[in-house]
Amino acid sequence: MSSAGPVSELAARADACADRLQAADRVLLASHIDADGLTSAAVATSALERAGIPVETVFKKQLDATEIESIAAREHDTVLFTDFGSGQLDVISDHVAAGDFEALVADHHQPSAPEECHPDVVTATDGYADFAWHLNPLLEGINGASELSGAGAAYVLARALDRAGDDDTATDNRDLAALAVVGAVGDMQAVGGELVGANAGIVAEGIEADVLEEGTDLSLYGKQTRPLPKLLEYATEVPIPGISNDQAGATRFLNDLGLDLKRDGEWRTWADLSDDERQTIASALVKRAVTRGVPASKIDTLVGTTYTLTAEPPGTELRDASEFSTLLNATARYERADVGLAVCLGDREGPLERARTLLANHRRNLSEGLDLVKRQGVTQAGSVQWFDAGDEIRETIVGIVAGMALGTDGVDADKPILAFASTGEGETKVSSRATGPLVGRGVDLSVVMREASQSVGGDGGGHDIAAGATIPEGQEDAFVAAADDITADQLGG
């Protein structure tokens, strides 16, 4: 790659941020709590520590005026926001203008509009608010929903810190590409199963640094850790009659192949198999799908691009980018961001075991949440559909449940889905999910969430395909009405 790193369009912005960080005595790093936020924090923390810059890290499940005020109260002169901050430049710019702190933002979400921000701090960049130390792919025409994640932005900053250091402090942060890929995969940026755009440049650097392998394999979750019957039983991304959601059927399918798929009486995992064994199973799986009438478009998605973290032990969740990202989601969403960060930073003892326990709990909660949606159903509006989980689904995972529900029986894949969950603090969390085809037709949930929430006294934002908001309790019906109108306009009435 060039000296500018994997995303040359962002090099000037990254260099400006790196120079400012080099001048800081210490840095407060604030980040989001999902897999992308955790990996963003880990990439940035590692790069700062390697550059000899003291760093303290805090996590927030959302960034609003109250949380930014709490950050200002910590009295750090320099604050680095990762995986959020662009959508809150209006509030951040007021604190910068007041001299509370200098702010740097490495994010990929939609930035605030210029007219919302302090005029002494920001300028306009193609309709977005901007200030001196703002690293966001959208400012340079790069899609922040599919081409560069928050962890990717943090990685671009880490590579700039490589360039900013003198001979004594310069480092090679290309090994951090592995975490950046985990963040991108966790942020659902693998378009058609593959990372593209600026993300592909990061993958290339990870391969050069010998921390990543890119390959083609079954695109099923759990290839590193699940026994083979469980791998196929739970492979519901492409439902195959007689195998998916059918433990006996999956076991019978494997037994009929005549392969030695057990070791010492225990089922092996996909990672344990030879290439020939994998090919035999994959071919038989495709043949079964064809004979049972699975659409060809679905069958094609059975095989996809995989990203393997070569420095991690085979047979563990950390070896596969998808499994790693799911493990991380199971930590911070249950108020244990410290556990996820420790795992990202290389602690393979207590934190990893704690993360595995949280993951088991996370999977159970997701399953119960999806069952709740199936039982109570969704309410159809004109252009959107919604369900209210109240306090029965945690606000931190209701968006994941909404995404899982989209397209299942009774849930229309041709409409965005809105999900409500109580925060227990007089507010309601709203999460929304759409599909790629809906985005292609004009749906932008970041706009829907922001404008609909602001119309009822809340706030929100995110990406075109997934976004969130917080609104006052009791305003759910008004929010749905506003969101429905905005979505209808985006779809051409």
Image (cartoon, rainbow, N blue to C red):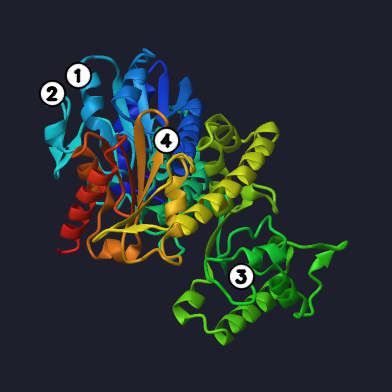
- Sequence-wise, the earlier of marks 4 and 1 is 4
> Residue sitting at 28 percent across and 36 percent down?
86
Left of 487 or right of it: where is 304?
right
Circle nearer the viewer, 4 or 2: 4
Left of 445 or right of it: where is 405?
right
Query: Could you tell me which secondary element the residue under label 1 belongs to?
Result: helix
| Separation (CA) of disc 2 from disc 3 | 58 Å
Q: Amino acid at mark 4?
A: His
* Callout 3 touching callout 4 (CB < 8 Å): no
Q: Amino acid at mark 1?
A: Ala
Q: Which mark is residue 120?
A: 2
Q: Which residue is mark 4?
A: 32
Nearer to me, 249 or 316: 249
| Separation (CA) of disc 4 from disc 2 | 27 Å
Circle nearer the viewer, 3 or 1: 3
- Sequence-wise, the earlier of marks 2 and 1 is 1
| Separation (CA) of disc 4 from disc 1 | 24 Å
Nearer to me, 52 or 344: 344
* Callout 2 touching callout 1 (CB < 8 Å): yes
Q: Residues within 10 Å of mark 4 (few under 14, many from 20)?
A: many
Query: Could you tell me which secondary element the residue under label 4 belongs to?
Result: loop
Query: Could you tell me which secondary element the residue under label 2 belongs to?
Result: loop
Left of 266 or right of it: where is 28?
left
Which of the 4 image quarters holds residue 438?
A: bottom left
Residue 171 in view (yes/no): no
| Residue 178 coordinates in the image, percent (x, y) | 53, 47
Q: Which residue is mark 3?
A: 244
- Sequence-wise, the earlier of marks 4 and 2 is 4
- Sequence-wise, the earlier of marks 3 and 1 is 1
- Taking 289 as reference, is 352 above or below it? above
Q: Which residue is mark 1?
A: 97
